[in-house]
Amino acid sequence: MKAAVVVFPGSNCDRDVAVALEAVSGAKPKMVWHGESEVPDSDLIVLPGGFSYGDYLRSGAMAAHSPIMRDVVKKAHSGVAVMGICNGFQVLTETGLLPGVLMRNASLKFVCRDVRLRVERDDTIFAAHYRTGDVITIPIAHHDGNYFADPETLAEVEDSGRVAFRYCDQAGAVSAEANPNGSQSNIAGVYDQSGRVLGLMPHPERLADAALGGTDGAPMFESLLGALN
């Protein structure tokens, strides 16, 4: 699996996801500066977490207009797998590759803690090593993770099975109490129509090694390796 990680000014999880990718694939991903015009030949492009451009203007809005993003969008439309984590999810919505927007958390506070997620699908390249209905623990760290879409868009996302993960409790029940940021329908991640572009607010790379305190994020990278190797 040939992977590339895009690095923006303000990215702070680019090395974390690069370590997770190398651990599962045995190959170091290419680190691609946002000012480049082309992503090297890759099976997977990752937009990492952080605070691109300091989150000025609006989270992900400036990064979406970085030179490299024209090629990321082009490659995504050609079928290359793309994963946006946290700030990367925000960037993907700003480019239009994913529907909806990420707004300020309902609490108006930065939230940094482990949350539980329910796997909504296991038939994609990102989730094949999970099972639908699995409850996994993954950390979040964001101020603007409140997923919102207009009623028509939300209905289309739901009806087409594009919700990837939902915030839930230990038993897998979806509730307001289990929702850390106010996201509509407890949505923590969504796919594009092809299922090859995923945006998610939680950080699977932060729990992908037992030394980090858990491995619930590892199956996501293992799924990608199995699908793209």
Image (cartoon, helix red, strand yellow):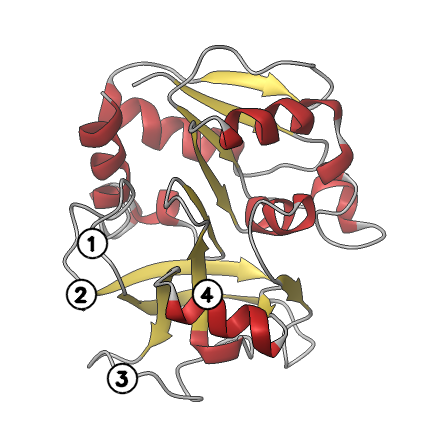
Lower sequence index among marks 3 and 1: 1
Asked whether residue 115 is in view, the answer is: no
The 10 Å Cα crowd at callout 2, few under 14, some 14 to 19, many 20 or more, is some
Q: Earlier in the sequence, mark 1 or mark 4?
A: 1
- Residue, disc 4: 157
In this rendering, which labeled residue sits more in front, label 4 or label 3? 4
Element marked by disc 2:
loop
> Circle 1 is placed at which residue position?
122
Inspect the image, locate mark 1, and give the three-letter code of the amino acid beneath it.
Asp
| Residue 227 placement (x, y as % from top left) | 22, 31
Mark with earlier residue (3, 2):
2
Q: Residue at x 30, y 46 (%)?
A: 212
In which quadrant is the N terminus drawn? top left
Residue for badge 3 = 173
Horizontal placement of 113 versus 164: left or right? right
- Mark closer to the chain start, 1 or 2: 1
Q: How far, Cα to Cα, is label 1 from label 2?
A: 9 Å
Q: Nearer the viewer, mark 1 or mark 4?
A: 4
Q: Are marks 1 and 2 in contact (CB under 8 Å)?
A: yes
How would you rate the neighbour count of disc 4 (Cα within 10 Å): few for under 14, some for 14-19, many for 20 or more? many
Q: What label does residue 134 carry, if any?
A: 2
